[in-house]
């Protein structure tokens, strides 16, 4: 079975700082990768996803992620955060052969100080 | 479109009581999912329904039952609630079962079992 590890549980940074959240997965086959975000009091929504092609994926709100297959990683980045980026971020993976088995990491809580 | 809706928003139960969490989607999606979210553990799949009339176990199905009532509705039942089932429950749906498809989440139900 696949698993997902998010290294940072909590991140605190100031506005305009750069953000990078780590995500590593464990699975022997090919996968699709997702980043979801949960803003305070809201439900999860998709930030971006990778399923094929260019390993550098751009999502909404200026976020991007890079799939490095050799490192089993899918790190999320944003060059300059805003207070409104305060949220919990979840990395998720699903094997291409088992589309219903979406596995989430434990999440990273990001607090952006104004 | 309301997307994915869940009722109730909050619920307090005593150990041994039963209840049903309701989920409905108005996006004409075929697949529906139930997750639980616990601090530091991300979301874990309880049950899913790839299409109307089918249901399958996820990662943590013990203590739960589901019913895919029709294409729109997918309910989760706790027959005899236990404190370990205190959690936030999310319903999700997506159009098909391809691994690259995005899941759309509801707002969640907070359940406290005393």
Image (cartoon, rainbow, N blue to C red):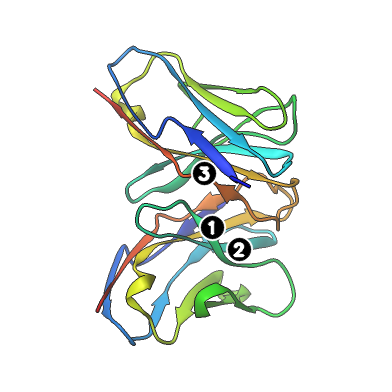
Residue B8 x/y as whole percent: 42, 30
Secondary structure of the residue carrying numbered label 1: strand
- Using the numbered discs, state the Cα–Cα distance from disc 3 to disc 1 in whole angstroms: 17 Å
A7 versus B88 height, above or below: below
Question: Circle 3 marks a residue in which chain?
Answer: B
Q: Residues within 10 Å of mark 2 (few under 14, many from 20)?
A: many
Q: Which residue matches tag 1?
A: A92
Q: Which mark is residue B65?
A: none
Q: What is the quadrant of the C terminus of chain A in the image?
A: bottom left
Q: For the point 46% across and 46% down, which residue is it?
A: B43
B63 versus B96 height, above or below: above
Q: For the point 60% across and 78% down, which residue is it?
A: A58
Question: Circle 1 marks a residue in which chain?
Answer: A
For the residues bearing labels 2 and 1, Cβ distance under 8 angstroms:
yes
Residues at marks 2 and 1 on the same chain: yes
B113 versus B97 height, above or below: above
Q: Which residue matches tag 3?
A: B106
Residues at marks 2 and 3 on the same chain: no
């Amino acid at each position: 079975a696949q698993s997902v590890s998010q290294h940072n549980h909590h991140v605190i940074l100031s506005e305009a700082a750069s953000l990078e959240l780590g995500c590593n997965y464990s699975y022997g086959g090919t996968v699709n990768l997702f980043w979801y975000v949960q803003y305070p009091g809201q439900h999860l929504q998709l930030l971006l996803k990778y399923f094929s092609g260019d390993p550098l994926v751009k999502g909404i709100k200026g976020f991007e992620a890079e799939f490095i297959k050799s490192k089993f990683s899918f790190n999320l980045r944003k060059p300059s955060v805003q207070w409104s980026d305060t949220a919990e971020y979840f990395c998720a993976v699903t094997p291409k052969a088992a589309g219903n088995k979406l596995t989430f990491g434990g999440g990273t809580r990001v607090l952006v100080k104004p | 479109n309301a997307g994915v809706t869940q009722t109730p928003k909050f619920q307090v139960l005593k150990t041994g009581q039963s209840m049903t969490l309701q989920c409905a989607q108005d996006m004409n999606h075929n697949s529906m999912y139930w997750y639980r979210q616990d601090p530091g553990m991300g979301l874990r799949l309880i049950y899913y329904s790839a299409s109307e009339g089918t249901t399958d176990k996820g990662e943590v199905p013990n203590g739960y039952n589901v019913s895919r009532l029709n294409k729109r509705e997918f309910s989760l039942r706790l027959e005899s609630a236990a404190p370990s089932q205190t959690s936030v429950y999310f319903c999700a749906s997506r159009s098909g079962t391809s691994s690259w498809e995005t899941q759309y989440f509801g707002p969640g139900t907070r359940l406290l079992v005393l």
